[in-house]
Amino acid sequence: MMRVFSRLVLGISLAICMLMGLPAIALAQPEAAELAKAVQEVENLDAMRSSLAAYLEDATEPPTAETMRQVCKPVGMKAMQLSKDNGWQVKQIANKYRNSAHKPETLQAKMALAQFEHDPDLQGFWASDTLNGAPGTRYYRRINVEASCLACHGGKGDRPQFVKDNYPQDLAYDFNVGDLRGMYSVFIPEVKQALEDVLSAS
Ligand code: HEC
């Protein structure tokens, strides 16, 4: 009788341990759904820039300083919003940058840009990474130059006046169609870490 009882206790404790252990295992990596969401959001971000640039290119009215500003600045703002909403770090990174906030800061970022430069067919890839010591997954996606980009990223002298005035350190010109312009980089922390951050902040 005693043996049956102790087996029962053992069985129940094992079941409890497994139940408690399982979510921990599931939380160790960002979930597939979250990774898929990151890919989709980056596609949306890129489509937003392309359509804004194409709209400007097709406009019958000559562009004003205001409409000129409505292409890449909003992309940067949307990237910040995505970071805030999802607990990610969403950035645009380029070797030839216009805004110094987009300069490659880490060895990983420099290597990812070199990989895109080296392999023109490479659209995007994942890598394990850490951010401020927290483990997570990084998604990189290439940004290519389209014809509509050249109005502002073409010849140095052809840049709109607001670019010349506002970005005296500008490096983002002299591109041709099909060139690598830069990349999007999304850091997705391990879900467990993100949860802990939320809990410790509250
Ligand atoms: C109307 C002018 C204009 C057009 C057209 C334009 N850009 Fe930009 N681009 C800018 C400005 C201004 C910035 C800096 C924005 C900022 O301060 O965040 C910028 C920044 C960027 C950046 C961020 C990296 C950096 O250099 O700071 C990328 C990537 C980029 N542009 C890609 C493109 C692509 C791709 C296209 C075409 C689909 C395009 N741009 C069309 C004006 C333009």
Image: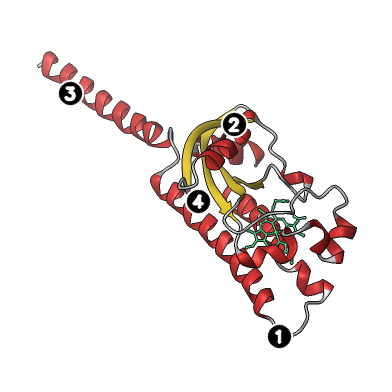
State the separation of the CA atoms marked 3 and 2. 52 Å
State the separation of the CA atoms marked 4 and 2. 19 Å
Of the image marks 4 and 3, the number of the one nearer the N terminus: 3
In this view, the residue in front, 86 or 156, is 156
Question: What residue did someone put label 4 on?
Answer: 38
Question: What residue did someone put label 3 on?
Answer: 8
Kindly check if marks 3 and 2 are in contact, taking CB atoms under 8 A apart as contact. Answer: no
Question: What residue did someone put label 2 on?
Answer: 108
Kindly check if marks 1 and 2 are in contact, taking CB atoms under 8 A apart as contact. Answer: no
In this view, the residue in front, 37 or 112, is 112
Count neighbours of disc 2 (C-alpha within 10 A) and say few if under 14, some if 14 to 19, many if 20 or more: few
3 or 2: mark nearer the eye: 2
- Dot 4 beta carbon under 8 Å from ligand 1: no
Where disc 4 sits, the SS reads helix
Q: Residue furthest top?
A: 3
Of the image marks 1 and 2, the number of the one nearer the N terminus: 1
Tell me the quadrant of ligand 1.
bottom right
1 or 2: mark nearer the eye: 1
- Figure coloring: secondary structure
Q: State which quadrant residue 150 falls in.
A: bottom right
Residue 35 x/y as whole percent: 45, 47
Where disc 1 sits, the SS reads loop
Q: Residue at 90% across / 59% down in the picture?
A: 165
Kindly check if marks 4 and 2 are in contact, taking CB atoms under 8 A apart as contact. Answer: no
Q: State which quadrant residue 135 falls in.
A: top right
4 or 2: mark nearer the eye: 2
Of the image marks 3 and 2, the number of the one nearer the N terminus: 3
